[in-house]
Image (cartoon, rainbow, N blue to C red):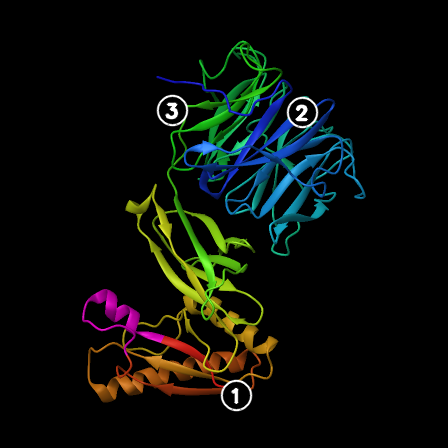
Amino acid sequence: MLSFPPFEYNSSGDDFAPAVSQNGRQMYFTEQDGSDYHISQTDMKNGRWQSPDELSSSVNGSPIVGTQSLTPDGQFMVFAATKHKNITGYGRTDLFSARKVNGKWTDVQNLGSTINSEAWDSQPSLTSDGSTLYFASDRSGGSGGMDIYMSKRNKDGTWAKATPVSQLNTSGDEASPSIAADNSTLYFASNRAGTVGGFDIYTTRLKNGSFTKPENIGEPINSTADEFYYIALPNSTTAYFASERSGGKGGYDIYKAMPNPEMPNPVVTMRGIVHDAVSNKELGASVIITDLKTRQKVAELHSDDETGEYFVTLTAGRSYSVTATRPDYVFYSERIDVPLEERGREVEKDIDLTPLSGEAATRLLVFFDTDKSLLKDESLADLDRAADLLSSNAAIKVRIEGHTDDVGDDGYNIKLSQSRAEAVKDYLVKQGIDAKRIATQGFGESRPKLKGTSDEIRAQNRRVEMKVIK
């Protein structure tokens, strides 16, 4: 049976636009203070939300700020503001971004004219990979009053020109889009014909690049009052939404829906902590997730500068490379296979970064066919990172070391591992790295990383490493 317990920190004013990060461990929401609106944040500890804190003036930089959306790691946010202080705007309300650096929200920027218009642009929702932005706008040229728009993020970090999501918009109003962690299930509010009240919650699914016909989520979530801002927690039966229904503390209140009657697809969430491999200190680092089959970046995030924590959402049934980089450190890469049966689970993977100094080493994610030394296409992403590292640190020299498992003749394995190390060197030289800076050595099976004969252990022992020698 559905239940709707109210959010513990609803106030006598409006409380709405819940947004979660870190797999539901943090919640951001918009609350009213007199005639002003601002963003507050709370953490989940021991099964309870803690007392909220208002974000700093870097974000709450105008009397009306709110309707925020965050990436899963909680390090990047898009929010709406009316005439944000010291930042030129385009319309009545614009969309802005902010980044979390050393525990503080900073680098507040207007998303620009490809997103914002002379009208009202608000209520953003980011996909879990941060590549697509949905939002609501009442700009001219739409289907009705408020319409849902979307934009794709370009490779240089800018946003493409926003376009209306025509399958969802009607002559009425569509608002508060919310894309679930599966990047497929979308919730939104509309006052189109057939609603229970004024604005109702609707659901739709993205299939083959197009959204399915929206369906009213029905009662009792929808009531004779207005409902907005429906969000689903990843891999959870819990959802949150805002409603103006009677019985609340005042205006719009936030409610929890248990269980969520329209569940998104389960996803794999991966979390971990980035450490200094020598001091064990937690580090802020760039973390890039790449689909090894398509060679496309799935996510680009940043571990927390204070705690070293990172969070990312993955699609099951694929293989990924996980790469962490930080200035003055050797990058770290590892292959992560996520079987279909992993859906709905949380994977933990800590990362150790080695300071860039003598004897610093990292495993290169390079792939070869059995008994071959021809680099496969999946290898190129990591080799490009190695080339970037060497280009940025012209004083260092490295040795590429090849290793095999214990299957086969010793002499043959030495020759094969040497050939593979040479293939890596040849690629780096083609990228402009001086050949004199790169030594190679094949060790065959003589230096196993792990002892044992299982398929898993042998896979770990088959490797190519890059070691700093000067």
How many C-alpha atoms fall within 10 Å of the one at disc 1: few (<14), some, or many (≥20)? Answer: few
Say which of 309 and 240 sits in front.
Answer: 309
**Label 1 – label 2 distance at C-alpha:** 63 Å
Q: Position of residue 342 (x, y in %)?
A: 31, 46
- Three-letter code, disc 3: Pro
Question: Which comes sooner in the sequence, label 1 or label 3?
Answer: 3
Q: Position of residue 366 (x, y in %)?
A: 40, 71
Residue range corresponding to the magenta coloring? 448-463
Who's the residue at 53% across and 13% down the image? 195
Q: Which residue is mark 3?
A: 259
Query: Quick check: 400 above or below 1?
Result: below
- Three-letter code, disc 1: Ala
Q: Position of residue 226 (x, y in %)?
A: 58, 15
Q: Which residue is mark 2?
A: 32
Say if the magenta span includes residue 397: no
Who's the residue at 45% across and 41% down the image? 23
Query: Quick check: 258 above or below 367?
Result: above
Secondary structure of the residue carrying numbered label 2 = strand
Q: Is residue 294 visible?
A: yes
Q: Position of residue 299 (x, y in %)?
A: 50, 52
Who's the residue at 24% across and 68% down the image? 457
Q: Which mark is residue 68?
A: none
How many C-alpha atoms fall within 10 Å of the one at disc 3: few (<14), some, or many (≥20)? Answer: some
Q: Which mark is residue 435?
A: 1
Question: Which comes sooner in the sequence, label 3 or label 2?
Answer: 2
- Three-letter code, disc 2: Gln
Q: Is residue 160 visible?
A: no
Secondary structure of the residue carrying numbered label 1 = helix
Query: Quick check: 414 above or below 119?
Result: below
Instruction: Indicate left or right for 56 with 237 as reference.
Output: right
Say if the magenta span includes residue 450: yes
- Residue 462 found in image quarter: bottom left
